[in-house]
Amino acid sequence: MIRRAYTEYDPFPELDIVDQHKLDTAEGLHMLGQYVDSATEIARISPAGWNHPLVLHLASRAYSALHRIPEALDCVERFIQAAPYHPFGYVFKGQMLEYSGKPKESYDLLCQVISHFPAHGTMHYELARVAAKCALWDEARHWIYRAICIQHSLKIGALNTDALRPIRAEIEAMHPGN
């Protein structure tokens, strides 16, 4: 069951058994890259289940994979309302805003919430990436350094991220903690 992944932030209430089964099926289909089938299975979840954070989490990812960005944004905004303490909503909403051609809005959103997630390396990484998309190079350097300090493995991703290519040599030279 996918609910185990979220206990770090706060356990969500239980779904009823039928909706949990549908959610598990939809997650499996999503993991296999069968996004249409995953979205179809999600649509079979009861109306009450559609307000559950795990359903909104998966629905936002499924709609994104299908390039149904407005629906993905709607689901992730509802996820944020249901679970404001969980970083996924903000990171994913930032990505959806960027994919919608709004990297500055993405950057502003993540800047507003980063203080609530100081140890979340991926959020720092996303801040660096969207800062670079906005040509905010000092900010991109700051955020990628922080991301690498938190999670050193993010350096590999940063070195292979097109948006960060102009500062690649600087990223290569970063050795936090030495």
Image (spheres, grey):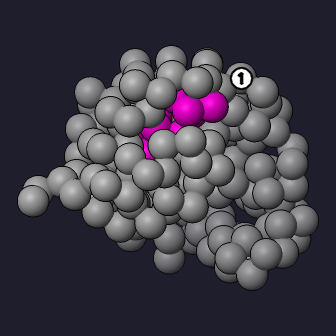
Q: Nearer the viewer, residue 122 or 145?
A: 145
Instruction: Please tell me whether residue 66 is drawn above or below residue 74 in the rendered image.
Output: below
Q: Does residue 125 belong to the magenta stretch?
A: yes
Q: What kind of secondary structure does the magenta stretch mostly adopt?
A: helix
Q: Residue at x 61, y 18 (%)?
A: 105
Check disc 1 and give the amino acid type: Lys
Whole-percent x and y of residue 166?
56, 42
Instruction: Please tell me whether residue 132 is drawn above or below residue 32 in the rendered image.
Output: above
Q: Nearer the viewer, residue 108 or 3?
A: 108
Whole-percent x and y of residue 140?
44, 33
Q: Residue at x 58, y 48 (%)?
A: 165
Q: Does residue 168 belong to the magenta stretch?
A: no
Q: Is residue 161 visible to the viewer in this orientation of the structure?
A: yes
Whole-percent x and y of residue 171?
39, 51
Q: Is residue 142 left or right of residue 83?
A: left
Q: Is residue 72 left or right of residue 125?
A: right
Q: What is the total number of numbered labels drawn onto the structure image?
A: 1
Q: Is residue 172 left or right of residue 53?
A: left
Using the rendered view, name the quadrant where residue 156 is placed. bottom left
Where's the C terminus, which quadrant? bottom left
Query: Which segment is the magenta one?
Result: 123-133
Q: Nearer the viewer, residue 92 or 160?
A: 160
Q: Is residue 132 left or right of residue 146?
A: right
Q: Which residue is mark 1?
A: 102
Q: Nearer the viewer, residue 163 or 41?
A: 163
Q: Is residue 76 visible to the viewer in this orientation of the structure?
A: no
As helix, strand or loop, the secondary structure at mark 1 comes to loop
Q: Residue at x 81, y 39 (%)?
A: 69
Instruction: Please tell me whether residue 169 is drawn above or below residue 142 in the rendered image.
Output: below
Q: Residue at x 40, y 26 (%)?
A: 139
Q: Residues within 10 Å of mark 1 (few under 14, many from 20)?
A: some
